[in-house]
Amino acid sequence: MTSKLLLACCAIAALSIAAATAAPLNYTVPEETTTLKPGPNLDVVQNNCTACHSADYIKTQPQGEKFKKDFWQAEVTKMIKVYGAPIDDADVGKIVEYLAATY
């Protein structure tokens, strides 16, 4: 038991040293190739969605009649519940309406 505890403490110490001496990660974000289309609630989408990802990402989502309001509602819900997007409840409907009408 004592040897397992000692081994665990050594592993934690080694990981802590490695984390403390790791170089920061730097990268260049690619330029946007698209912009969000004009429409009602565009400002709400820009303030919420593009805080985490680009307009290019939104543009690459499936489009067409079968991917409308239900699809965008599920996407916005996923962003909130799975990815922790800090979107106010009052903005959810506005975002879904904009995306369903525009994409």
Image: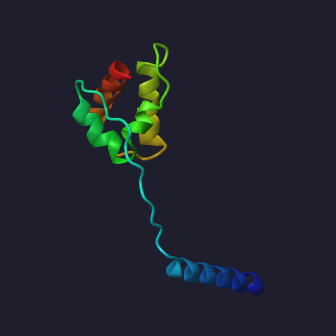
Q: Residue at x 31, y 32 (%)?
A: 36
| Residue 95 x, y percent position in the rendering | 32, 30
Return the x and y of residue 101 as percentages of the image width and height. Answer: 33, 19
Question: Image quadrant of residue 100?
Answer: top left
Query: Observer-nearest residue: 88 or 46?
Result: 46
- Which residue is found at the position 22% from the left and 24% from the top? 40
The answer to whether 12 is drawn above or below residue 40 in the figure is below
Q: Quadrant of residue 99?
A: top left
Q: Quadrant of the C terminus?
A: top left
81 shown above or below 74: below
Residue 41 relative to residue 64: left or right: left
18 above or below 80?
below
* 65 sits to left or right of 1: left
- Relative to the observer, which residue lies in front, 61 or 86? 61
Whether residue 88 can be seen here: no
Is residue 5 positioned above or below 50 on the image? below
Measuring from the top left, give residue 91's x and y in whole percent: 28, 34
